[in-house]
């Protein structure tokens, strides 16, 4: 699996866990990182779903300054936000938290080798769990 797809799954799974714990600020940060990884994996529609979820809860968020998520990450402000969040929430920490919590929190277990449609279906299911 592509490293960006792997990171996308980790960020989305942890975003679901954060929302279940009503940690909405953390959830939004994870959705920004998930949106970025979705862009890097050429899953622009997934990035835009992350944007919509963030704006639903916080209409003034930086992701709303552009029409599409991938446009936001190319701006100086967007690039700075991504860099800041990557420092605050390192991938290794996210991987550890997901491995510790995912068994009890996910409605469906992660597929063994999610690629193509299996990946899209699983990602769609994770996004559907978020409000």
Image: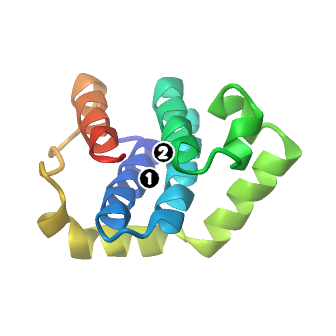
Q: Are marks 1 and 2 in contact (CB under 8 Å)?
A: yes
Q: Which image quadrant for residue 65? A: top right
Q: Residue at x 50, y 51 (%)?
A: 31
Using the image as rendered, state which of residue 12 and residue 62 is in the foreground.
62
Q: Residues within 10 Å of mark 2 (few under 14, many from 20)?
A: some
Q: Is residue 55 above or below residue 10?
A: above
Quadrant in which residue 22 is drawn: bottom left
Is 125 located above or below residue 93 in the figure?
A: above
Position of the N terminus, as image quadrant, is top left
**Looking at the picture, how far across and down is residue 61, in whole percent?**
69, 49
Q: Residue 42: in sight, yes or no?
A: no
Tell me residue 5's x, y (percent).
41, 42
What residue is disc 2 on? 4
Q: Is residue 101 above or below residue 2?
A: below
Q: Nearer the viewer, residue 59 or 81?
A: 59
Q: Residue furthest right?
A: 76
29 and 23: which is toward the camera: 23
Q: Is residue 9 left or right of residue 48?
A: left
Going 83% across and 40% down the picture, which residue do you hit? 75
Image point (38%, 49%), residue name: 6
Depth order, front residue of 117/15:
15
Residue at image point 30% right, 33% down: 124
In the image, taking residue 14 as reference, residue 75 lies left or right, namely right
Instruction: Give the class, few, some or many, for how many residues have Cα within 10 Å of label 1's Cα (few <14, many ≥20).
Output: many
Disc 1 marks which residue?
7
């Amino acid at each position: 699996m592509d490293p960006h797809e792997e990171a996308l799954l980790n960020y989305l799974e942890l975003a679901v866990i954060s929302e279940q714990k009503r940690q909405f600020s953390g959830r939004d940060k994870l959705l920004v990182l998930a949106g970025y990884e979705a862009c890097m994996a050429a899953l622009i529609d997934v990035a835009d779903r992350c944007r919509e979820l963030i704006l639903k809860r916080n209409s003034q968020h930086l992701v709303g300054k552009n029409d599409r998520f991938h446009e936001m990450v190319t701006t100086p402000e967007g690039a700075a936000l991504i860099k800041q969040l990557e420092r605050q929430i390192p991938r290794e920490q996210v991987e550890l938290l997901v491995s510790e919590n995912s068994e009890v929190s996910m409605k469906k277990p992660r597929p063994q080798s999610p690629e193509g449609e299996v990946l899209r279906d699983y990602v769609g299911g994770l996004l559907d769990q978020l409000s």
